[in-house]
Image (spheres, rainbow, N blue to C red):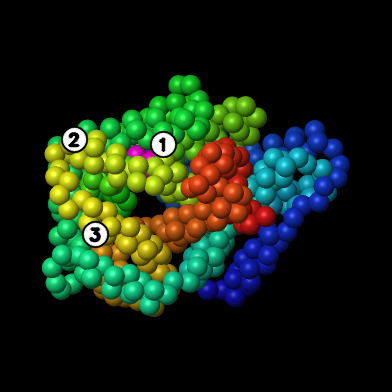
Amino acid sequence: MNKIILLSIIVLIALSCGEKKEQKSKSDLELKMNAIAEGYVKLVLEVGKYDQHFVDAYYGPKEWKPKDENLPFDSAANSKLITLADSLLKELELLSEYSATELETLRYRYLYKQLFSVKTKIIILNGSVLPFDLESRALYDVSPNDINEEDLQKVIDELDKILPGKGDVAERFIQLRKKFEIPKDRISAVLEAALKECKRRTSKFINLPAGENFKVEYVTNKPWGAYNWYKGNLFSVIQVAVDFPIYIQSAVGLAAHEGYPGHHVYNILLEQNLVKDRGWIEYTVYPLYSPQSLIAEGTAVIGEELLFPADERIKFEKEVLFPIANLDTKNADLYYEVLDLQKKLDGSGMLAAKNYLNGDWTKEETVAWLQKFELRTKDRAEKFLSFIETYRSYVVTYDMGAILIRDFMERNDGTQENLAKSWEIFNRLVSTPQTPSGLFD
């Protein structure tokens, strides 16, 4: 990688961590911020012409959306886009002496971090390959934690003691899990029941905008297991991949993560509170490779935990979902015990992605690691590797997003023992401009 480019990214990261000063007038600030926000949206849409995955959602003015897509990236495109990004970043920096409310300060920081990540994406499109940690920091505003293989092995050893049978731990886990596979002809009914319950529980703590809605589609041949495509006007399309088996505990996981209080709720609240109520146009576009994704994925993971305190999830699944799926609850307690241990392996996939993308592991070594420490079949390990190859360091948004959101909530008295406070904080996080590094303040 070009050392000058590498140095410029490091310098930009350092600059992006600076705080803005507070003086001058509010109305002028709002006008200037709105103009920068418009430029940001148009820049994201332009970059999206060269990467089909970059623009995850857009529901702003139709005339802004470029007609051309999947264009080859060349030096002319690089020069044009870098100039636009630099211009917008400089305009933001000129606002550093304006006075601002707390919400305006959050908006300023959000725009700066998002623009910085867009510039990084342009540099990557131009052919630069960043080390995994630097790519994570530049795109998602977070440095991944170190993962200790010895700690992961201890979890595997614990699983070895409680899983039925002898031999390979992953194989024994897979055999146990087969007993809890949802029959294909019952997936829709089970997921419908899970979505209904997740929405019911979410609505107790979050005021969902009137008219919000979604639909579910079942798809194949995707690198992911499920995806929320936000369409604007408070509507989502949730796609669920059915290439591989879906297990009973995954129904609530999918419903919560993609729906309530996960991505669907995150997007409808930002649209209602920031786009409709405040006219902040920047939230009509969602660049996938950006700090916004870490907040979105982190809140989706933590929201799933908030929905079902203590053993309420197990109770719901046993009493409601098991019958719909025509599954026997025999061995269910052992299965849930195993699943709790499996959660301690979180981060193993992130480590696999880091070593693979940095060129330290071969494809075969990465698949073997995923089979051992993620307890995947070979087919599922290869599917996850295809996700890594497609989305690269995006994998940090799940584990690091959950870590940052959970830590922020706990530091602000949001715990399982103080559920009302936890939901209050969660509501704020999904309704206001947030950045990963801002959660440390």
Reply above or below: 168 against 306: below
**Secondary structure found at label 1:** loop
Question: Is residue 350 or residue 172 the one in the foreground?
Answer: 172
**Secondary structure found at label 3:** helix
Residue located at (64% from left, 38% from top): 38
Q: Quadrant of residue 432?
A: top right
Q: Which residue is mark 2?
A: 324
In the image: residue 72, left or right of residue 183: right
Q: Quadrant of residue 374?
A: bottom left
Which label's residue is closer to the chain start, 1 or 3? 1
- Front: mark 2 or 1: 2
Q: Which residue is mark 1?
A: 260
Residue located at (17% from left, 36% from top): 323
Reply above or below: 97 against 121: above
Residue 380 is marked as 3
- Measured in 3D between alpha carbons, the distance from the residue under mark 1 to the one under mark 3, in whole angstroms, is 26 Å
Instruction: Report if residue 213 lies within the magenta region.
Output: no
Q: Which amino acid does the dot numbered 2 rest on?
A: Ile
Residue 190 is marked as none
Q: Position of residue 257 (x, y in %)?
A: 39, 44
- Measured in 3D between alpha carbons, the distance from the residue under mark 3 to the one under mark 2, in whole angstroms, is 26 Å
- Measured in 3D between alpha carbons, the distance from the residue under mark 2 to the one under mark 1, in whole angstroms, is 20 Å
Instruction: Report if residue 259 lies within the magenta region.
Output: yes
- Front: mark 1 or 3: 1
- Most distant residue in the front direction: 417
Which stretch appears magenta? Answer: 255-260
- Name the magenta segment's main secondary structure: helix
**Which quarter of the image is occupied by the C terminus?**
bottom right
In the image: residue 351, left or right of residue 329: right
Q: Position of residue 53 (x, y in %)?
A: 42, 49
Residue located at (33% from left, 43% from top): 313
**Secondary structure found at label 2:** helix
